[in-house]
Amino acid sequence: MELLQCTNLKKVYGKGEAAVCALDGIDLTVSRGEFVAVVGASGSGKSTLLHILASVDKPTDGQVLIDGVDVGALDPTRAALFRRRKVGLIYQFFNLIPTLSVEKNIALPLLLDKRKPDPAVLSQLFQTLGLEEKRSALPGQLSGGQQQRVAIARALCYRPALLLADEPTGNLDRKNSAEILDLLKLCHKNLGQTILLVTHDESLAAQADRVITLSDGRIISDRPRG
């Protein structure tokens, strides 16, 4: 069953001779429960695609449907609500609140939405991500790898339909990068989470179910692992 569908997706910045085409007719579907990696050189359109999928940017043309919702048609308020309820975002910079405990950082999207965290969901996340003993710690007391785990848990606490990971290991060393990828794979397997991972590291991408390669705003390859 399709969770994500992009049809003739285009994004142009600027006008006239100064116009830059960041996405040039992207057609893409992702089924519920898939783990998909998107790779490509700098300037290939990876980040632009992710920002449009996350509804923080709008396409110039084309359509994006996520869980049946046309995200490009949402006004800013509805787009923010949609992100908070349907799309989990993980960046290479952790963006944790330094004065809040690990547990409060993780629950923050729900609290902003005036919803109470489900203790069972939180407990499962703490256990899956190895954060049980860090519930009361502040971000400054954690290693980089542990902070990224918290960022992953925060993105998963409301059980989003789609998890978008933008270079989530770009700020980590090789050991922690491998660990974070293993945790994403675990969330995919144990929680059935649909994941779209944007990365420049093809060795990381090769561990996804499917690898999509972008170049000059177009998909030039879409292949299953192996």
Image: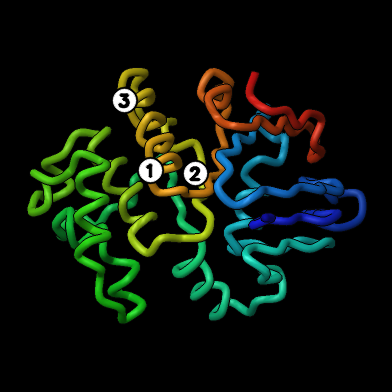
- Number of numbered tags placed on the structure image: 3
Q: Which quarter of the figure is the N terminus placed in? A: bottom right
Q: Which mark is residue 50?
A: none
User: Residue 207, how many percent across, how many down?
Assistant: 53, 24
Q: Is residue 211 above or below residue 8?
A: above
User: Residue 66, how many percent across, how many down?
Assistant: 64, 63
Q: Residue at x 82, y 48 (%)?
A: 27
Question: Residue 186's image quarter?
Answer: top left
Q: Which residue is mark 2?
A: 165
Q: Are marks 1 and 2 in contact (CB under 8 Å)?
A: no
Q: Amino acid at mark 3?
A: Asn
Question: Residue 123's image quarter?
Answer: bottom left
Residue 142 horizontal side relative to residue 44, left or right? left
Q: Amino acid at mark 1?
A: Asn
Question: Residue 127's image quarter?
Answer: top left
Front one among 80 and 20: 80
Q: Which residue is mark 1?
A: 190
Q: Residues within 10 Å of mark 2 (few under 14, many from 20)?
A: many
Element at label 1: helix
* Mark 1 → mark 3, Cα distance in angstroms: 21 Å
